[in-house]
Amino acid sequence: MRKWIIPSSKSGTLSFLAILLFILLFVLSQTIRIIPSHIPESPSFFNSPVHAILLILAWSSGTLALFSGLFSILKAKERAIPVFFSVLFGLFIFSFGAGEVLSPH
């Protein structure tokens, strides 16, 4: 029963920890958001560098969770439930981030 709850491979554990890091960084980026007293002439993602850096790190952490989870499922035959959830969550994060970068607004 325990093998379905705790990841047994190193890459599965890395995948689970990367998703936890994503959640921490995302919550931190939303909490530390600095609201400017004036609206800039050309609003951009990089007007608040702290917020931008935290979100880029969160996206890279989610992407790391996706690829390390896929590696652990395919190569190390990992079958722990948190690894499957981290792969699904990482796929959502990766596709959302890629869509934000590739599609113009």
Image: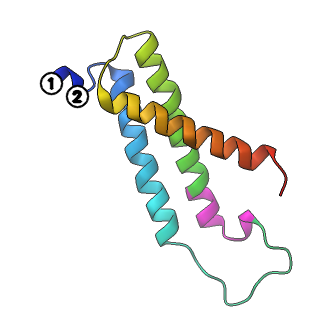
Please, is residue 74 above or below residue 60 in the view? above
Residue bounds of the magenta highlight: 45-54
Residue 92 is tagged as none
Q: What amino acid does circle 1 point to? A: Arg
The amino acid at mark 2 is Ile
Considering every residue shown, the one lying at the far left of the view is 1
Which residue was labeled with disc 2?
6
Q: Are marks 1 and 2 in contact (CB under 8 Å)?
A: yes
Residue 72 point in image, percent of width and height: 41, 18
Q: Secondary structure at mark 1?
A: helix
Residue closer to the observer: 76 or 87: 87
Asked if residue 46 is positioned above or below residue 56 in the image, the reply reads below
> What residue is shown at x 64% (from left), y 39% (from top)?
95
Magenta stretch encompasses residue 102: no
Figure check: 30 above or below 98: below
- Looking at the rendering, in which quadrant would you find the N terminus? top left
Q: Main secondary structure of the magenta part?
A: helix
